[in-house]
Image: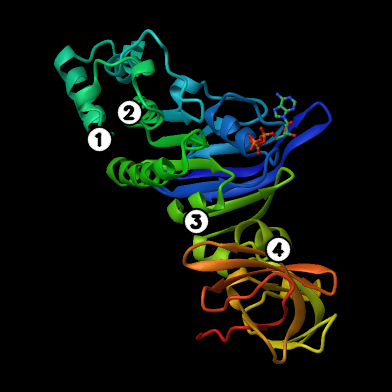
Amino acid sequence: MSLRITHLSKLYGKNIALSDVSIEIGDGEFLCILGPSGCGKTTLLRLAGGFETPSSGSILLNDTLYSSPEQCLPVERRNLGMVFQSFALWPNMTVRQHAEFPLLRKKYARMDAAEKNRLIDQALESVGLSTLSDRYPDELSGGQKQRVALARAIITRPKILLMDEPLSALDAELKISMRKEIQDIHRMTGATILYVTHDQNEALAMADRMMIMKNGRVEQIGTPEEIYLHPRTAFTAAFVGKYNLLRGIWDHDRFYEESSNACFHDRTTCSELKEQNLFPVRPDQFRIVKQGDGIEGKITNRQYCGREIHYSVDCSGRPVTVYAPVREDYDLNDTVVLIKKEETD
Ligand SMILES: Nc1ncnc2c1ncn2[C@@H]1O[C@H](COP(=O)(O)OP(=O)(O)OP(=O)(O)O)[C@@H](O)[C@H]1O
């Protein structure tokens, strides 16, 4: 059951919302679509759901044509479930009635009441709402409302689940516990999930693969490890890994930083970034010392974060971010040297 998206583009008038996107999503795969506001994430999801018609390109589920400029399979024939940021619950319906709602469609008219009740019980159980089934939305917390939306989305056992920023309305702690619940639902249903987010931590934590988008185009596709440890573009490096992008000259595996005498040895930087004379270094890959061979700078900001301290360091007019262990404790305006940790550090 692979979902094949080929050269997909969407124009609104002259505005290019999506441009030449291609990806094959495997059966049961959890794909996170990640990018900043306006990069085309929701447009891609709406095209996959059949709410929009592509300007060019196609979407196929196995050999069934879902979408092309000429032909679009209606939403109700796509066997998919959807969860949105806004929950989209009806105030006059109970939790149980929400879960039941998709079963009221004509397609399920012949299903007997006992079977429907069994499916509803199962769906409510799987999202932990069995005891709240008679409550109305205004009697629920944000996390419970999002669970109702999840139960409604999975009740018909869809092959594909489309999720558009489902956790963005929740507070930080609840987000983390709901991530685990979504992973549980993924394991339980085996559904292919297309999950839109602009939160890189959410994507890194849950995805089998991530698709990084910018300005309607794909920047990079890969596993969380590939994206985090081996970004291939400056945008991916800065957006996902919060890398500092040092400028300088590469000579094979040696990088000479342009504003200092510092030379760094690195074997992992990809050729695309080397060609742009860039060296990506994550904030946790630097060490701060008082003296040494590295990049000199001055501490301009300091944030104590419990396990580590986040510093902004001004290096010849360029800001560099460093996350250092609390034992490397410096004050504002201290003059320091940044050296890069060895890979085994
Ligand atoms: N119906 C529409 N008519 C015109 N332009 C649109 C329409 N829908 C989206 N766009 C434009 O297409 C681009 C992509 O929008 P989209 O909603 O897909 O972005 P997004 O990545 O989901 O953003 P966000 O994270 O803010 O939701 C934006 O420039 C947006 O203004």
Local SS, label 4: loop
Q: How far apart are marks 4 and 2 (CA)?
A: 38 Å
Q: How far apart are marks 3 and 4 (CA)?
A: 17 Å
Q: Which of 15 and 108 is in front in this view?
A: 15
User: From this viewpoint, which residue is outermost toward the bottom?
Assistant: 292
Q: In the rendered view, would you say 170 is above or below 205?
A: above
Local SS, label 2: helix
User: From this viewpoint, which residue is outermost toward the top?
Assistant: 92
Q: Do the residues labelled 4 and 1 touch (CB within 8 Å)?
A: no
Q: Which of labels 3 and 4 is toward the front?
A: 3
Q: Which residue shows up at 63% across the image and 84% down it?
A: 267
Q: Which amino acid does label 1 sit on?
A: Ser
Q: Which amino acid does label 2 sit on?
A: Ala
Residue 80: name its quadrant: top left
Q: Do the residues labelled 2 and 1 touch (CB within 8 Å)?
A: yes
The residue that disc 1 covers is: 126
